Amino acid sequence: MDSAELRNLLLYSTIINYAILIVWFVALIVAHNPLYRLHTKWFKLSPDAFDAIHYGGMSVYKIGIMLLNLVPLVALSLQ
């Protein structure tokens, strides 16, 4: 795999991962109460804990996107 193919792979991967992050955020904003009710059937969560878990998950996911997709893409583009 040459650097152009790797660059394209990282670009598409970054776009797909950010799309997943945006869908997660929008789903949480639009359907917060139904999602909260669904999760409280399985776990005992307060609304604050539910929000904190999702916020933390989105933060970790975004950091993963940056470290594993975006930074290598930028590094390859600077060559």
Image (cartoon, helix red, strand yellow):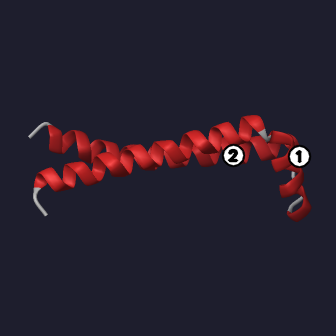
Q: Which sits in the foreground, 55 or 31?
A: 31
**Amino acid on which disc 1 is placed:** Ser
Callout 2 crowding tier (Cα within 10 Å): few <14, some 14–19, many ≥20: some
Q: Position of residue 35 (x, y in %)?
A: 81, 49
Query: Which residue sits at x=62%, y=49%?
Result: 57
Q: Is residue 73 left or right of residue 51?
A: left
Q: Position of residue 72 (x, y in %)?
A: 25, 47
Q: Position of residue 79 (x, y in %)?
A: 8, 40
Q: Quadrant of the N terminus?
A: bottom left
- Which numbered marker is on residue 54? 2
Callout 1 crowding tier (Cα within 10 Å): few <14, some 14–19, many ≥20: few
Q: Which sits in the foreground, 22 or 40?
A: 22
| Mark 2 / mark 1, whichever is N-terminal | 1
Q: Position of residue 47 (x, y in %)?
A: 86, 42
- Which numbered marker is on residue 46? 1
- Which numbered marker is on residue 21? none
Q: Is residue 7 left or right of residue 20?
A: left
Q: Which sits in the foreground, 42 or 28?
A: 28
Asked whether the residues under the numbered discs 2 and 1 touch, taking CB atoms below 8 Å apart as contact, a structural biologist would say: no
Query: Which residue sits at x=64%, y=39%?
Result: 25
Query: Which residue sits at x=47%, y=42%?
Result: 18
**Amino acid on which disc 2 is placed:** His
Which element type, helix, strand or loop, lies under badge 1? loop
Q: Which sits in the foreground, 18 or 56?
A: 18
Query: Which residue sits at x=60%, y=43%?
Result: 23
Q: Quadrant of residue 21?
A: top right
